[in-house]
Amino acid sequence: MTITAPNARRHVDQDIFRDVIGNFTSGVAVITTNHADSRFAVTASAVSSLSMDPPMLLVCLNRRLATADAVSDSGVFAVNILAEDQGELAAQFATRHPDKFRGVQTAEGKLGVPVLATALAYLECRVTERVDVATHSVFMAEVQNAASQPGKPLAYFRSRFGRFNDAIDERM
Ligand SMILES: Cc1cc2nc3c(=O)[nH]c(=O)nc-3n(C[C@H](O)[C@H](O)[C@H](O)COP(=O)(O)O)c2cc1C
């Protein structure tokens, strides 16, 4: 079953929805891509693993974002998972600015997208399907390259960044 046309009638107040869904604690990622010789990036928590065979994930981006258009046009993006001390980086990529990448060390990934050198992990993906729902596009994508480094994740709970205190990384 595919449902892509949500009922315009709201059953739950938006403020209540924001308040309640904020309890779903997530990691924080920066979605990056490259299109027409320009780099695009946006902070996102709406990221989910989708399938193991083949390895797939999905990200949800507001269609008003330049990054959403760039991902549609390029067909490739990277999910850069932030480390616990990168709250400022998350804020930087969540705020409109002519150069969101200022002061940020990047490398070029195998798919030609910028990857954040200091991120906890990154996954380079090729889009297989885009579904537009309400204000957002859901990009489903195959993971083509992925790597991680020792560290702990940045967490996001009720509109605030924090630490996952019990995180254990045996490599550290
Ligand atoms: C922690 C956090 C998570 C976010 N998650 C998403 C998301 O999953 N999808 C999305 O479209 N916007 C998300 N946003 C909002 C975008 O980051 C923000 O609207 C965007 O960076 C603004 O970019 P612009 O100023 O270039 O338009 C999130 C913001 C923050 C701070």
Image: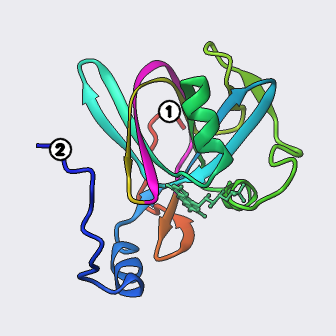
Q: Is residue 116 above or below residue 152?
A: above
Disc 1 residue type (three-letter): Arg
The residue that disc 2 covers is: 2
Query: Residue at the location (67% across, 24% down)?
Result: 113
The residue indicated by pointer 1 is 171
Q: Is residue 83 above or below residue 114?
A: below
Question: Dot 2, how many residues are within 10 Å of its Cα: few (below 14), some (14-19), or many (20+)?
Answer: few
Q: Is residue 149 magenta?
A: yes
Percent x, y of residue 164:
46, 61
Name the disc covering residue 126, or none: none
Q: How many C-alpha atoms fall within 10 Å of the one at disc 1: few (<14), some, or many (≥20)?
A: few
Q: Quadrant of residue 24?
A: bottom left
Regarding mark 2 in the picture, which secondary structure is present there? loop
For the residue labelled by badge 1, is the local secondary structure a helix, a strand or a loop?
loop
* Residue 36 drawn at (x, y percent): 77, 24
The span shown in magenta is: 135-154
Question: Which is the main secondary structure of the residues drawn in magenta?
Answer: strand
* Residue at (60, 28) in percent of width and height: 73
